[in-house]
Every structure is written in structure tokens, then in C-alpha cells.
Image (cartoon, helix red, strand yellow):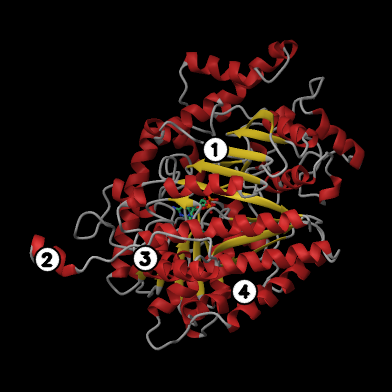
Amino acid sequence: MAKLLRMTLHEFQEDIRQGIPSTLPTRKEYEQQINHAPKRKEILSREEKKLALRNALRYFPVSFHAELAPEFLEELETYGRIYMYRFRPDYKMYARPIEEYPGNCLQAKAIMLMIQNNLDYAVAQHPHELITYGGNGAVFQNWIQYRLTMQYLSEMTDEQTLAMYSGHPMGLFPSHKDAPRVVVTNGMMIPNYSQPDDWEKFNALGVTQYGQMTAGSYMYIGPQGIVHGTTITVLNAGRKISRNGEGLEGKIFLTAGLGGMSGAQPKAASIAGCISITAEVNAKAVQTRHSQGWVDEVISDLDELCTRVREAKMKQEVVSIAFLGNVVEVWEKFDREDIYVDLGSDQTSLHNPWAGGYYPVDISLEASNRMMAEDPELFRKKIRETLVRHANAVNAHTAKGTYFFDYGNAFLLEASRAGADVMAENGIDFKYPSYVQDIMGPMCFDYGFGPFRWVCASGKPEDLAKTDTIAREVLEKMIVNSPAEICQQMEDNIRWIKGAQENKLVVGSQARILYADAEGRMRIAVAFNQAIAAGEIGPVVLGRDHHDVSGTDSPYRETSNIYDGSRFTADMAIQNVIGDGFRGATWISIHNGGGVGWGEVINGGFGMLLDGSAEADGRLKMMLHWDVNNGISRRSWARNEGAVFAIKRAMEKEPLLKVTLPELVNDTVMQDLFGED
Ligand SMILES: NC(=O)c1ccc[n+]([C@@H]2O[C@H](COP(=O)([O-])OP(=O)(O)OC[C@H]3O[C@@H](n4cnc5c(N)ncnc54)[C@H](O)[C@@H]3O)[C@@H](O)[C@H]2O)c1
């Protein structure tokens, strides 16, 4: 790997301040050892390629154009995008302690820290293509956008707001101290232009990007973020199949994907106490997770896998096994060998089926990648055939009793589009639930529990340990008076935070995730702000995954347990981000396309810097209250029982909150009109 230049702090700061270099840096070699994004589909016509080049060159003085134009064309033709590799900085990319960032405003420095964390080689999936996770979750479209954004952040004051258009920094605009410092929009399209190929085309033109959820919003904290949610999901799935209150000991969980988020599955399964088998076609991804200790063993032979799984079951071991190969082979083999799978799911990137998110069976990874670029039609055909085989094999297992759930990766959606047998008898619903319908929605989101997170901006592990203790103490106080409806959640979360240090979850910034409800989030944040004021810890950045109570409208995932017809609307996510914006968020973001695919979801989030001030205390209370209760009120209006309970409780606690409640229609009224069904 090419050596990173050793830079002093001063040189690093100067590099940030200069933005676009005044002289052209030398070209960079393409480093083979790095996990690169696959070549994107050839989609632009000759005229559109010219437009893409003009778009790219408009960042630079005219004197650079003759040299850069052929280089950018080569990138476009070789990789399907113009990443401007030459401008990748030479310094090491990681979340530095906040005081090391140049600038005039602490909030902007916090955002720089979060951006660099999303691009850290230890964190990002394809760091040179500025992709954090999910195969296409971009922080920026190219390195010049990164450089310009960092420059703007280093210049801005508390009286300005930076407008980010899908990775492009439009500029600094006058605002005020309590306004967000940055407003991010990613992939916002005119609705009729939101088909997957629209992303390919407009992204190749350089005018939009796929921000996923926490990639384009600078809030990714490595796989830890997802370990907690996955642990909760596997634990509760285990509770669903438990016949006599027994746990997951000796039970088998079969799934796929060891990538950005999916890589959390084996770790979460081990925390939940079962035997997990996670298939993964990409040897690099297997190696990464194995070397990080996130998966215990690697097996690439199916017979060996069966022997090992039988042994683990007999001994009731808690063990996580990576199978290097296609998941379809495992489902089929276990069926033939009659290995009973207790829990099954899938976390391949089916939100992105045609561009490397899901690989066809019986074809090598390299051949698949070639086919994807050279013969996309054939590739699509192979994917559809694989999906049908995949679903058939899953069906064979569920007929024997396996509990299978869709993991929000659009598996059922794409399988149904491929013509696989996954529809319920009514022809409208899928035969299997999504994990949100059965687990996260009714058990967590409806009560306001979601993936609250924080980052210690000092970069000190001691600060993180202190915040863990503070958060645990807050939850332990709260559980004493918690109603029965939420005690299980509170217990799970206390258990998680107690084990957090021991589970060594930090990759990248000193970050922690902790599911909490509105009251929990506010009380923990207040306690952090007090500890900062007392000088016990440095500043803290609060945030959350977009995969939460209120931030995301996604009919097959976050809002799949909304049954009043409104799950195909996106008012909640838009309301949320606007509401967070004027209630004190440090930055806000709204995206098209995270998780389940372009055009399939609108999701938003926030970041908030706590600096120990009285202003921060006021902002956090006002914003976090809205950020959770907005979604609970919508879920309550959709007649979700848990949410009705939670919003009534919130109204008792906050006299200024007054929410419209639904009246339930008696069935006899419908029967009188429509007769018995
Ligand atoms: N973890 C969660 O809580 C969660 C929640 C919601 C949705 N998701 C969804 O899970 C999906 C995965 O996310 P990610 O960040 O890990 O993506 P990713 O692209 O980093 O990882 C997916 C992995 O699946 C592998 N893969 C693809 N096809 C395969 C096949 N047929 N057999 C075996 N392996 C195969 C790929 O090589 C890749 O490493 C996304 O669609 C995401 O939206 C995850």
C-alpha cells in the first residue's frame, strides 16, 4: 500500500484549509489491496459523458482542464464514475480529537471529525470511492467535494449554514447561532425519476448520490451501530420461537453477508447465545470480519460445515461460523442433510441487486463482477434465477418449522419481483414477516426505543467508559419506575451497556450505541452535558441511526408495521428533519434510498454537539423530545397499540404536548355495512 505522508498537525490543518490545491498533485496509483467499489454500469451516452466531464471540471480553474479531462474520462470509462482519485488527501483518514481540526466554530469541527470517521479505512467499505457501507452508501461523490466541504467547515462561523446537495457543497449561507451548521440532502429526486437506473445515470453525471442512512449523514459508527440492533432482533426472534421460556442455546441461525452492516450478525448472534452460520461470497469481507474477531471460524467446504454445525449443536456451543460461498448453497445443503435451522434471515445487499449487492450462485465472484459490467442483462437473469432458488430452499426449511424473517434488505421484495414463491395467499403480503413487522416495530419503535448513539469527540477511550457508566446509571434509575410494557427493553439495554466495554465494539471513533426511548435519550444527554460542564469528559456528539422510530418512512422496513395505508407516504420523515432543524440540531440530513433501495425509502437524521453549555441543554431537550415523539404520534395515529400507550404517557409528562388520538371503530359497524367476511 502506498505510504501515507507523515504530516504534522500544522500541515494537516493547512491541507484542510487550502481546499482545492493550487497546483495539481501527482496522480495516484490504484491500490489493489484496498476493497474497491465494483465497476458501475455503463449507462451514459456519448453526449452524457461530455456532460459528466463538464460537470466534474467545473470545480477547477480552466488551466487544469486539459490535463484533468482525459484522466476523468478514463475514470468514467474504467469505473463508471469520476472519483477524482488524484485529489485523495495524503494524510491518514480517521476521527481526530476535536481540537486538532482547524476552524472558527466547535460545531463545524465536530462535523469534520464525523466525516473523517466515515472515510476511515478501518470503517469505510470502499474508502477510495468514498463509500462507507452498503456497496453504494456515499459520503461524497468525489474527492474534490470532500476537500471543498472540509475547507468550508474550517472557515465557517456560528452565523453560517453549509448547504450540502448530494455530496456537493453548494456553499455557506448566513444563518444564526441556533440554526443547523449543515443541512444535507442526498438523492432527493423528482419522484418519477427514482428508478434504480436513474441513480446509475444521475450519479454518473455527478449530480446526485446514494447517501444510504448514516453514510451521507456522517453518523456511521462502524458495525457496532448495527450489532446492538441485530442483538435485539436475534434475542427477540429467539423469544418468539421459545416454547418453554428457553433461550437460544444450541439453536441455529442461518444468514448471509459479512459486509458493512451484515458483518455484525455473527457477533450479535454470539451475544444472543446461539450457533450462527453466515455465508459470504467475498473472501476479503470474510477475512476482515475474521481478523477483527467478529466471526469465530471460517469454513469453505459444505461437508465440513455440516460436520462442524452438528458438533456445535451437540455440545450446545456458542459459536459463529463464516461460510465462504454462496448462501443458496448452504440453504440447499442443510435441507438435503436435514440440519434443522431454528432462525433464518438474509443480509445480502438486495437493495442494490444489479450492481454488486447480491451474487448469483454457481458463478465465481470475479466472473460475476465481469458479467455485471459486460453483460448486465445476463447478470440480471442469473440474479433472478438465484433468487428463485434461494426462496425455494428457504421455503423447504420453513415447511419444517424454521422461523424466517426479512432483514430489511429487500430480499422478499426482489425475490417477489424475480417471480419467486414468497407471496402470501392474499397475493398482497409476503409470506414471511419483516423483522420490523414482527420484532422491532411492535417491541421497540412503537414505544420510542431506537438506536440512540454518541461519539466522544475528545477521542479518549476513558471518556467513552465514563459515558457508558453515566448512561447505565440513568437507565438503572429509570427502570425502577418503568411500566411493565417497557421493562424487557430496559433490561436488554442495561445488559447491553454493561457489556459494551467488554465486547470491544469500537471501530473508528470512540462511539457507543444504546437503544433508548425519548425519556432515556433526554436524561442520558442531560447527564452527559453536565459531565462536560463539570470538566469530567470532553464534548460529545449525539446522533442516531436513521433506522429509528421517526426518521424513516420505508414501507417494507421501518414503517412496515403501519397498517392504516400510510406506509407509502413520507410525511413523517420530512416532518422529522424539518422539526429537528429548528429545534437545535447541529446538522440534519434527509435521504432517498437508504437500506432498501433507491426510490423505496425516505430517511433522515441529525447530529448534535453537546459542549456543556446551557444552550446545549435547552436544545437537546427540545429536539430529542420531538425527534422521538413525532414518530410515536404517527404510529399511534395508525392505531398501533404500543404507540397509543407511549404517546399518552408522553402527554402526561409534558403538558405542552397535545396529540390527536385515534378512535377505534367497532367491527360491528363494518359488518353492518359489508356483512361478515
Ligand atoms: N444489520 C441491520 O440491522 C440491517 C438493518 C436493515 C437493513 N439491513 C440491510 O442489510 C443489507 C446488507 O448491508 P451491508 O452494509 O452489510 O451491505 P454490504 O454490501 O456491505 O454486505 C453484503 C454482503 O453480502 C455478500 N453477498 C451478496 N450476495 C451474496 C450471496 N448470494 N451469498 C453470500 N454472500 C453474499 C456481499 O459479498 C457483501 O459482502 C443492506 O441491504 C441493508 O440495508 C441491515
Tag 4 near tag 1, CB within 8 Å: no
* Residue matched to label 3: 640
Q: In this view, does 416 lie to the left or right of 173?
A: left
The residue shown at (80%, 42%) is 105
The residue shown at (38%, 74%) is 339
**Gap between marks 2 and 4 measured at Cα:** 47 Å
Q: What residue type is labelled 1?
A: Asn
**Gap between marks 4 and 1 measured at Cα:** 32 Å
In terms of depth relative to the viewer, which is nearer, 391 or 581? Answer: 581
* Residue matched to label 4: 496
Q: In which quarter of the image is residue 395?
A: bottom left
Tag 3 near tag 2, CB within 8 Å: no
Vertically, is 28 above or below 535? above
Q: Position of residue 317 (x, y in %)?
A: 55, 81
In terms of depth relative to the viewer, which is nearer, 521 or 25? Answer: 521
Q: Quadrant of residue 241?
A: bottom left
* Residue matched to label 2: 671
Q: Which amino acid does label 4 sit on?
A: Trp
Residue at the front extreme of this rendering: 655
Q: What residue type is labelled 3?
A: Asn
